[in-house]
Image (tube, coloured by chain):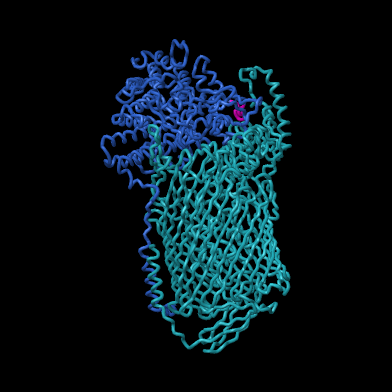
Chain colours: A blue, B cyan
Amino acid sequence: MMRLMSTITTRGAWVAALLLGSVQACTKLDEVPQSSITPGTFFNNEAEALAGLSGVYAQLRGAFPGYCCAYYVLSEISTDEMVVPTRGQDWYDNGRWLEMHRQTWSATSPSGLQDINSAWVNDFTGIANANVVLSALQSRTIMDSTKQAGVIAELRGLRAFYYYQLMDLFGGVPVVTTTDVQARARESRDSVFKFIESELLAARTNLPATRDAANNGRMTKGAVDAILASMYVNAGVFTKDGGSFSGTTYNSCAGITVAGGLDACQAAVNRADSIILSTAGYALADTFVKNFRADNNLSPENIFVVKFIAQDGLGFPFLQTTLHYNQFSAAPWNGFATLAQTYTAFDTLNDRRTKIFLVGKQFNVETGDSICERPGCAKGAPRLIFTPSIADVTQATEGEGVRIYKWPYDPKHVAQNNGNDFAYFRLAEIYLIKAEAELNGATATAPGGASALALVKAVRARSFAADTLSAVDRNVVLRERLFELAFEAKRRQDLIRFGQYTAAWQFKTAGTDNLTLMPIPQTQRDANSKLAQNPGY
Amino acid sequence: MRLVRYVIPVLALFVLISQPLSAQGGTGSVRGQVSDSVTKQGLPAATISIVGTQRTTQTAPDGSYTLTDVPAGTAVVRVTLIGYAPQQQSVAVTAGGTAEVQFGLAPQASLLEPVVVTGYGSQRREAITGSVSSINPAQANVGVTTNVTQMLSGRAAGVDITQNNGEPGAGAQILIRGGSSISNTNDPLYVIDGVPINNVATEPPSMSGVVGTPPLPRNPLNLLNPSDIASITILKDASATAIYGSRAANGVVLIETKKGTTSGGPSIEYDSYVAASSPAKRLDVLNGTEYRAYVQSQVPIWRADSTACAARPACATGYADSSGAFGGLKPSALSGLGAANTNWEQAVTRTAVTHNHNLSFSGGNEDTRYRASLNYMKDQGVALSSGLERIQGRLAATHQALSNRLRLGVNVTTSRVNNQYLTFENTGGFEGGVFQNVAIFDPTQPITVTDATGTHYYEGGGSSVRNPVALANQLIDQGQTTRTIGNATAELDFAPGLTGQVTVGLDHASGGRQIYYPKANPIGNALGGGVARQYDLDNATRTLQTLLTYRRETGDNSFDIVGGYEYNKFKSNLFMAEGKGFFTDAFSFNNIGAATTRTDSSGAEQSLLVSFLSRANVGFKNKYFVTGSMRYDGSSKFAVGHKWSLFPGLSASWHLSDEDFMRSSPFSDLRVRVGWGVQGNPGIAAYSSLLLLGAGSGGSYPWGDAPQTGVAATQNPNPNLKWERTAQYDLGVDFGLMSNRLTGSAEYYVKNTSDLLLSITVPQPAVSETELQNVGKLRNRGIELSLDALAISRPTMTWRAGLTFSADRNRVVDLGPYASGLTSGGVSGQGQSGQVSQLIKKDLPLGTFYGPVFVGVDAQGKQLFQCTAATAGCTNGRTTNGLGPAAADYQVIGNANPDFTLGFHNQVTWRKFDLSFLVRAVLGQDVFNNTALVYSTKGNALQGKNFLKPALTDPTGLHEPAIYSSRWVEGGSFVRLQNITLEYALSLPMLRSVQSARVYVSADNLLLLTGYSGLDPEVYASSGLASRGIDYLSYPRPRTVTGGLRLMF
């Protein structure tokens, strides 16, 4: 070998050295992304901080069908307000829609791995994005310090709201305020409750009472108060881990101590009063529908909303889930419907019945044209009819099931993107929360109405020609919440608080107490071995 | 520019230090003739070389040759020619004298190049130690061949090609030895003339996430004209591919293009063909009459139930349409029926014509050689509005100077490929694409209707049903790529055997895409009154290679070593503009400014790959060969501290038949090989290890009524992200019997892939649900056999036959935290969202079908599934509760991997006739017939949709949804006559300038034997993680007949 090698001339060796030497400079492999950003080079001024904040708000859309889907879908379809029948070939989808309605999910079932998992991921993604921006803003001042404090308060408020949804669905979850990704155990539900409460209280200080039109939709003191009021009235559930509250009796807020040493029911009343008396000037809209139309950003009733506009990827697509294929120009999916028993619970005097349901002969909501099950409805051809009854939920026809038309289409819609905002909290609910808290023993206060009955009647006034309600108890409040807040992602929470969530209703048999908390999806337990499962799964 | 900075000084230096090496002792000449030992006829184009020197020439048409400038002394003259055993003889050359050497070559079984390119060099076939398959391009370029991938099909053991679908120039899934990755690419590395190709899509993507699934990308290698290919070599095992290190885990395909030649003087070749194709098989749907009869037979059932119901109180309520409880179809179904009888499949398909023209000329002298070629191809698809057009030019020139010590070469290929796509040609999902609608669109409806507003397409189909003819004709989706691959090489001998080489390459592709969904079509209208998009994608790869080779051959011993450096820089830029809402369709995609709303986006990506490589081959006594190689690769895509990795390879072979103790054995040739090596797979996106914030609509949010552009983190960082590594062991035996009239090889391999790159669900909170991590292990084991026989060798007739066989078994050895497995293979169709068909799990092969076991249909027409007592509502092991199957009862219900694959190619020459055919067989695999699942259910009629005929006699109820189960997983074994070609050599004595004229007819996909009930069992699943064997209804595969002519002047 050496003999062979020696024949290489010195000249050759010199060239070899040169060939290799010339390339030394070409071994740098640093990466600098060009069309995306790394956090280390970002969040240096107000505009960049607001861009980060916007990204955290954007995650609110993820609760709705058409985006990610989960919180909304779980809060509605698992209750007596909504069902998604299998219609011929349509909407079978591995049985997950019926599984959700029948509450037969598990950590590994189709809806467990899809919808329940999506809910977990969606809310935590909001939290993680908030943490990324917060960690940048909390380490240095990059803008006017009052403004920066305001942005930080918004981020903390939003993060608390994502935790609120997780606590509602799953109970205790890991509480994380840093950006590192690692396996962490679940906190108790009560300590998550206390974390959310303290974060909201801290954020409240630096939030404004109201926003100008250009900033409509951003966090306010009112939004924080509303979330807190909801937490307090649900405190009988929200402070208790699975198995330690009842699935079949009313879970009162009375006797639970919250921040400031207050009884939770009283704290709920205080928060309600704070909203009613707010300088933001919240008031019940003069008509019910004003809260849901495309121009509902003008409603004085809305307190905390998810903003939608008629633009690709930024609109409210709820109509797609429920309207018949031929009813709207964006070709909806003919899915979500209401149970006959829920539809008939609305009496005929209740004006809201005609405002939120579609039943009987159908028209195109946009053009008013008569429609049939097939397009090109010839004269004399049978019309599309929505019927309250669904004979067989596994084999429904196209017309079965009452449809939900609470959010009318936006005349400026772009395809399925409507500009209607979705209110998580509006004043009507605050009245009902206050009434319920008073019925649970909290001191009656003047704002909104002197008594629980007055509060409930205040909400009902615009929906009845002559309201004959003369007495109120908790069950009246629950019924009123159904009438007023149907399809606003409240029903699951309400039924659990009232101990009625696991009861039997149409297409569903009675279930066990453990169903009041969702299972931790197996995917998440695989990823994080420290996550304990909820009892009964 | 940076490259140029380095290259120019190096090249200048070459010239400066180059002085002629002094000729020692003068030179002489060698001449003689090479002939066939059977026919005794002269053999043209045989390569004559003097061992240990660069002196080489080719024989003239009569087999004669002359080599001048041969150093005086004992020269070893070697002759090699495809189809013959190589020979060498020693001869004494005197200064100024002429020695004579005659050769008589014996024909052999295999038609393979005697010298094999091995990457950064070449070797004699006998000296190869790794696992290498070669394909004879002349044999493989038959019928309509659009790209090099199609030429690999069925001709090399262990190389499985599945074309995505039947569209012209379709992309393909290529698995060499079963693939090595779950989530990364399984495509091999393609190296054209020594320069690795960045084989990514050069055309911008189609519109995705809108209404339907976009068409699959076509094969990026459509840029290369198959007629320009001189040789194809596939490096399969790790010892062979290790020299390509990080990019070689899936094998390497080395393509050499044709170069100029001096034998026989300048020549002109022209070849041309015209082909006609039509769909090989048609969907068995109900025709208009049958569909009408079915609907009419179902309405009385509903009426009877309705009458019976009316007597019951439940039916008497205000809204008495309890129709779901009734059997049959509602009377309204009758009013939906039309009067036409349309065969939608015939309406969207056609007999397509393809034509192809090649013109090339080549020539030169001892010092300068050139070859130029032009290609025009127009390939119409068998479906309306689809096709491919290619215009390509290629120039290859070599020049030698300084007494053949400096060799320069330039290769430039430039091509323009125009693709016309069918907008929704593949898995249609909910809305349904062109072929889905062929299956479901009401056959009683006409294609067009004329009313007060004029003649227009009938669109009364209903929900998620679209007139397929309108889809094909009205929706425009087209793309085009202009791609230029150029490289220049300079090679200089510094000393005898010591050669330096510099290659610079530029691969630039400029791709465009134009899409318009007009408002005249319901899809375009629903998306906001017409949608137009234009994309621009610019990909550029710059390559610099510097190599230093030392090669020495003395008698039976040989030694060569190569060391080098390679630098690759990949850059891509994408720009997209979209307009929605047009007041007219007249602009098509050409005037996005006229849209009501406009959006645009852009992005850029850049990555680097830097390598140091070396390899040494040692041959001892022409019997023992050892190869060692080492490559040190750095990729910018991995995390800091994990960017560099070492990829070694080692292999040896022993030429047993040359040993004395084997002299009396029946083997004319016998060799054993062993090899080991490690390779990588860098097929991940740039910046994969970083925490990224993305700006786009996902992070935008309206405050007030104005959307605020926001940022949201889009990717979790992984500071430990590193290479996926595949270690492979290979054991091979090559043998020849009966003077190599029968040759073959057998191989066994084990491939262990570790540090699999998988998107792993991470603990929340995290900005993204998953993170790319190195977890998991995959193992492939397999056997490959290939046999070549020269069955008949007579002066008037020869028959060569070749057989390839391979069997691969893959298994997931470890899947990190996914103990319960990962799902893949999404089911497509209405009511199937979220449904998956496959499971990736420890100890199971990739491509395992997993789902409920179908046991029958009950009296009510409900499907029953196997279950266990633990499941609610399970009686006697069958589901009874109407809830459908439970996830807990899912089982393994099939395996998409074949037991083995076979290729059988034949070439028979009889006088002036030449007959060749290729048969391919793939046996033992299961296919999930997604098409049957969703389209052979009578329930389609509930929504006024047609269905496949077998459903008529099926007991499944009208109202029963389509449920994925073992019922839809079928055996997919098949035998296909891939191609058969008959060629005839014309005598044209009146045209003296014509050296040869041949005419041929060829048929592709003439015969398919299978028990599979769908269109074609050869299916490709594009979606998601490593899914295989799912028959999504897609573009039909054609049957093609070609007639062609080859002329040589």
The picture quadrant where one finds residue B116 is bottom right
Residue B840 percent location from the top left of the image: 54, 47
Q: Can see residue B77? A: yes
Is B718 on the left or on the right of B945, as rendered?
left
User: How many numbered marks does the figure carry?
Assistant: 0
On-image quarter of the N terminus of chain A: bottom left
Along the viewing direction, whichever of B897 and B1048 lies nearer the viewer = B1048
> In the figure, B656 relative to A80: above or below?
below
Pick whichever, B448 or B86, lies toward us: B448
x then y, percent, for residue B716: 40, 45
The residue positioned 70% from the left and 55% from the top of the image is B1006
In the picture shown, does residue B38 fall above or below B180? Answer: below
Residue B89's quadrant in the figure?
bottom right
Taking the image as shown, residue A201 lies to the left or right of residue B249, namely left
**Magenta highlight on residue A398:** yes
Is residue A263 among what the camera can see?
no
Magenta span dominant secondary structure: loop
User: What residue range appears in magenta?
Assistant: A392-400
| Vertical side of A18 occupied by A305: above or below | above
Please tell me which residue lies in front, A10 or B249.
A10
In this view, B1031 is above or below A84: below
Q: Does the magenta segment cover residue B930?
A: no
Give the percent coordinates (x, y) of residue A147.
28, 35
- The picture places residue B326, in percent across and down from the top left corner, at 67, 26
